[in-house]
Image (cartoon, coloured by chain):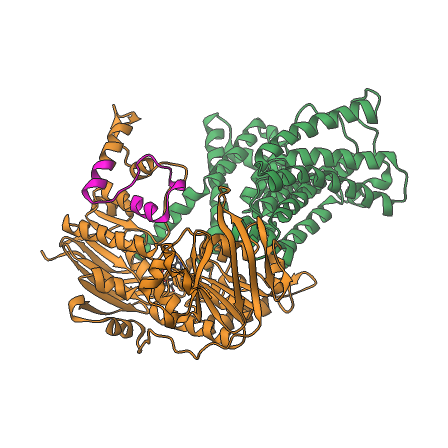
Chain colours: A orange, B green
Amino acid sequence: MEYVIEMLNIRKEFPGIVANDNITLQVKEGEIHALLGENGAGKSTLMNVLFGLYQPEKGEIRVRGKKVKITDPNVANDLGIGMVHQHFMLVDTLTVTENIILGSEPKKYRLSIDMKKAEEDVRKISEQYGLKVDPAAKISDISVGMQQRVEILKTLYRGADILIFDEPTAVLTPQEIQELIEIMHNLVREGKSIILITHKLKEIMEVADRCTVIRRGRGIKTLNIAETNPNELASLMVGREVSFKTEKEPAKPQDTILSIKDLVVKDARKVDMVRGLNLDVKAGEIVGIAGVDGNGQTELIEAIAGLRPVESGTILLNGKDITDLPPRKVTEAGVGHIPQDRQKFGLVLDYPIGENMVLQTYYKQPFSKRGVLNFKNIYDKAKSLIKEYDVRTPSEFTRARSLSGGNQQKAIIGREVDRSPDLLIAAQPTRGLDVGAIEFIHTKLIEERDKGRAVLLLSFELDEIMNVSDRIAVMYEGQIVAIVKPEDTTEEELGLLMAGSKKQKVGES
Amino acid sequence: MSSNKFINLLVPIISLLLGLIAGAIIMVGFGYNAVEGFKALWNGAFGDIYFIGETVRQITPYIFSGLAVAFAFRTGLFNIGVEGQVIVGWLAAVWVGVAFDLPMIVHLPLAIAAAAIAGAIWGFIPGLLKAKLRVHEVIVTIMLNYTALYIANHLVRNVITDKGDRTESISSSASLKSQWLMEFTQYSTMHMGIILALIAAVFMWFYLEKTTKGFELRAVGFNQHASKYAGMNVEKNIILAMVISGAFGGLAGAMEGLGTFGYMSVQSGFTNIGFDGIAVALLGGNTALGVVLAAGLFGSLKVGALNMPVAGVPTELVDIIVALIIFFVASGYIIRWFLSRMKRRENK
Ligand SMILES: Nc1ncnc2c1ncn2[C@@H]1O[C@H](COP(=O)(O)OP(=O)(O)OP(=O)(O)O)[C@@H](O)[C@H]1O
Ligand SMILES: [Mg+2]
């Protein structure tokens, strides 16, 4: 019995689209099997079929050689299949332990929950697999990386030995990614099998044993990682050659567009996160903000966008004071914002994707006149954006919620870039995008720059920062501690600066 | 898409059928003739033009109170305070109707506007508290129901009248009653309010679905973070939603004050028009058209029930049937689940 999981000729349709068209996936016992494909290729759908959330129209699933019908997630649990979803499913107000045992609580005398035993169990599993967590901490108080560990523990607690990870690294910092990779190695050593979805070829090369590539709902090929390379994977998945290094001319910076002086911003807990920050961004340049997550980047961007109050300091746009203006005024002053959290800020998930395309402009002509919406113009606009930005959706009337994660992201980017604002803030714009889409978005950002716009890029991917930025501003403990040019620096040096190394401060100009 | 719409239509119909079947079972169980009972119910609601007039009269305030609940619901708010808004609307309308002597073309609109404004104020308070202080609207609106009831009783007894049990009747220039309609329906209590109710339903549909304001209100109801990001004023929209919802509630009160009764008496308890509005909105899927249809159902059952004793069935039974329908609608997701399960079976 070689395969633990066999999904044979799976077909899954949604209204207007075939998400999985005759896909076959075979996972060997004890391997890490990567699933690679463009945004909307059908990866999440395939995994949801395996986890019993969707029923396939056609095809057969075998677990450990035995044909099974996975009618709901409970059946999947019983078969030892566990899934860590792209968007976490934890109860914020409960503790780590409570979340883990939720739904399969150990009982005392069949009545009350045996919390002692629960905590003991959780501790045991977390030690066994090297998944350090604080069992008594509240979910709302722990980092995203920790929350992910809780999700993993949840599946292990239910006795899963086949684990599905749907884009686990998209939300993690590079440090957390390394830890996760370590955890995955531990899990495999303990005899688990893993299916891993990720868009980062580097990660696949590093951890996976084999990889199945799917494109537009069809299975393309399964390869041994030892016998392939990132270029081959990328072109298999996109169907054409992909260049990883974006070509661009040297920047021609002009007038200062954004000028931030002595900015102080607090977070929700009233702690200073931005502490007297100064930064200028000129027309015709891309400034990348590099830094370890939690050094005030989120607060900085939200303050510029008018989403978070400014304690002190000023933000000037084209010389005009926009400090503490409401978001609408900031937008009208010429700021576009690709938000870090696309589902929280970027989209009204229950609106059709077409209406999401005019989320900031619906009140203007030609989308409305005297307060009455003009749906024809709205959907015409949406249609052209969907085409230009290659948003894969059955139609412009489809709810944003049913788009794949990456396509939601492309829709937001299309909307923001299309307004061609004087200042474009791009916070992790390529999070969750496939390599082809990343290339496209980078080209778009550079095009905006060449049109004379200012671009402020926030990313935790040093690759992206080095590749796209004209200047790199290193952010540490709420301040810009250094400004360097990508051609004059290395990832190692940046890493040191981001960790707060003082020595490098000479590099500041 | 189309199969979803089909299910959306199917679920209330199945709920209704299940409710009626359950009602029949109970009637038979207690030894009554179910066929006769339902026949009497039907005749009591639609038997002749008089009964139809009575039914329409009953439907009118239900449309308004249903719209009030539905409007708030569509913007992410739960307005349990329609009952209180009905009471203050009723009072305001009657007060204007009694206190002034004006030509009808001014008087009637003024009285109606007074009701809408009173209801709007009663909606504004929880809206403001929700927007500024994050106080949950359910708690505030429930409390405001009692406030409305006791304030209205106090005003009727001690301010508008001198220890009377009811106000004077409004002057005819503020009345929604029409001689022609009364004659046409063999002197039922039907009044012109139904036209206003239907206009209100069209207004709600248009405002929510077609205008930029409606776009904002619904967006705020779905996702406040994204709405704020998009430049919408979340607080203002919450308040506006409650104000409009409250105005609908107030207008439901105007229907009673200016149409059905023509006066306001000291209330021993709630009118239930507002509370029934919750069920109407729920049954109508919180859409304008749905509310009109659901109000039609509720009104017909209520009026038809009065005729059921003719077949020997106690009116209380109809309350049970209505309660059963609400029960089945509230648990509509069970039916939905069942339907999707059947569909899945077909697919296999
Ligand atoms: N619940 C749903 N209803 C309708 N269509 C859906 C639904 N879920 C997914 N789809 C569609 O199925 C296709 C595949 O989506 P899926 O989420 O599987 O993509 P993915 O490969 O995971 O992409 P990504 O990398 O962007 O997450 C998409 O075109 C999407 O719009
Ligand atoms: Mg996905």
| Residue A29 located left or right of residue B249 | left
Identify which residue is drawn at 26% across, 28% down: A116
Q: Quadrant of residue A494?
A: bottom left
Magenta stretch holds residue B129: no
In magenta, the rendered stretch is A123-151
Q: Quadrant of residue A142?
A: top left
**Vertical relation: A298 (above or below) A131:** below
**Vertical relation: A204 (above or below) B17:** below
Identify which residue is drawn at 50% across, 57% down: A301
Q: Residue furthest top?
A: B163
Q: Residue furthest left?
A: A1
Q: Looking at the figure, which quarter contains the C terminus of chain B?
A: bottom left
Picture coordinates of residue B347, whole percent (x, y): 31, 57
Identify which residue is drawn at 57% across, 69% down: A256
| Residue A229 located left or right of residue A285 | left
Picture coordinates of residue A47, whole percent (x, y): 28, 56
- Ligand 1 shows up in which quadrant of the image? bottom left
Count of numbered marks:
0
Query: Could you say which is closer to the camera, residue B104 or residue A259?
Result: A259
Query: Could you say which is closer to the camera, residue A300 or residue A436?
Result: A300
Picture coordinates of residue B226, whole percent (x, y): 52, 54
**Vertical relation: A189 (above or below) A370:** above
Looking at the image, can residue A366 be seen?
Answer: yes
Query: Could you say which is closer to the camera, residue A354 or residue B203?
Result: A354
Identify which residue is drawn at 23% across, 61% down: A34
| Residue A19 located left or right of residue B14 | left
Looking at the image, can residue B261 be seen?
Answer: no
Picture coordinates of residue A324, whole percent (x, y): 61, 53
